Every structure is written in C-alpha cells, then in structure tokens.
Image (cartoon, rainbow, N blue to C red):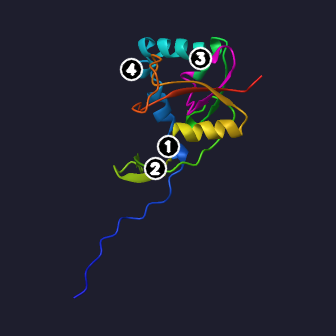
Amino acid sequence: MSASRITAAKWPPVTSSELWSRATADRYDAEETEMSSAAVLEPTLAFLAELAEGSRTLEFAIGTGRVGVPLRERGVQVAGIELSEQHLGFDTFDLVEQVLVSHHFTRDGDDGRYRQGTSRHRYAWPAELDLMARIAGLELERRVADWDGAPFTEDSTEHISVWRKPH
C-alpha cells in the first residue's frame, strides 16, 4: 500500500510590485489611517528632524514618502530605499535581499480566485546594522528604543538609530 502525498499547488513567483500594488500604496498613505494622522505623524517628524540635525538621512522602506517628503519639507535631506516600485514617489529605488517569509494573497482575476505569494525577509540586528554602517564609513551617534526617545536596552523590541559620517 503506498501512501498518497498531498502537495501544495505550485504558484508562480510573485514580484514585489505584485505584493505591494498601487492600491496598497494608496491605502497605506490614506489620510484617514491612524499612522497617517497628524497625531502620529507630527511627533514622528519632529523627533526625526531633531535626530537629523540638518544632516543627510536614509530612510529604509521609504514607501511613497509619507515620512520622507514632509521631513524634506522641514529641511532634512532624505534618501530612501524601497522594495516596491509601486510605493515609490521617487525616480530610483534599491532592492534589498532579506530572509523571513511573509505570506501575501493577491486576487487572481475576476473569478474570485486568489494567488498566494511569499516574500523572504531577514531582519538585521542592531549590531549588524552598526557593522554595515561602520563598513560604509559611518559612526553610531545615537540609538533609542522608540519615538519618545526612551533608552535602548537589551529588552527593547524596536530601535531608532542615527549613524553619521565623521567630520
């Protein structure tokens, strides 16, 4: 007696632009979403502008510029890296290879079917980011745990880090 094997359907690879569509970008930046509200965005922008101290900055996952554009309007020079071409509000972008699987479902036509896609991400530890910054000629100036500037500790689950090019 042979055991039958159930195999998952083979789906074609999904590109980053299919995962992060124009509609997703529009929803992401919709003014009515909490993260785009003035109550969230204004303190974030004020904090980032203070951290930048007028220096050039790099925003990872800059998206459509929800943070980067108003930060630039405050006089901060902003460059960004973004995975999805659909989210970009700028002319160029840089793809970053990561390792962690994230599952996404995309409507496949008008018949109600969906296509499952996965994207691989790898989150970098602060020490890895510090090494990459050091290799790029930057020095860590400040690291805090959150947008309120709380101290970064071994128990912190997030961080905001500032690296600068030495004078």
Foreground mark, 4 or 2? 2
Q: Quadrant of residue 35?
A: top left
Q: Is label 3 in contact with label 4 (beta carbons under 8 Å)?
A: no
10 in magenta? no
> In 3D space, how far apart are the residues under numbered discs 3 and 4 (Cα atoms)?
23 Å
Crowding at dot 2, Cα within 10 Å, few <14 / some 14-19 / many 20+, comes out as few
Q: Earlier in the sequence, mark 1 or mark 3?
A: 3
The amino acid at mark 4 is Glu
Q: Position of residue 151 (x, y in %)?
A: 46, 21
> In 3D space, how far apart are the residues under numbered discs 3 and 2 (Cα atoms)?
30 Å
Q: Which residues fall within the magenta stretch?
A: 51-67
Q: Which residue is mark 2?
A: 100
Q: Quadrant of residue 34?
A: top left
Q: Nearer the viewer, residue 12 or 151?
A: 151
> In 3D space, how far apart are the residues under numbered discs 1 and 3 (Cα atoms)?
23 Å
Which residue is pictured at 70% across the width and 40% down the height? 135
The amino acid at mark 2 is Leu
Q: Which residue is mark 4?
A: 34
Foreground mark, 2 or 1? 1
Foreground mark, 4 or 1? 1
Q: Which residue is mark 1?
A: 123
Crowding at dot 4, Cα within 10 Å, few <14 / some 14-19 / many 20+, comes out as few
Q: Earlier in the sequence, mark 4 or mark 1?
A: 4
166 sits to left or right of 27: right
The amino acid at mark 1 is Tyr
Which residue is pictured at 54% across the width and 43% down the height? 17
The amino acid at mark 3 is Leu
Q: Which mark is residue 51?
A: 3
In the figure, 73 relative to 163: above or below?
above
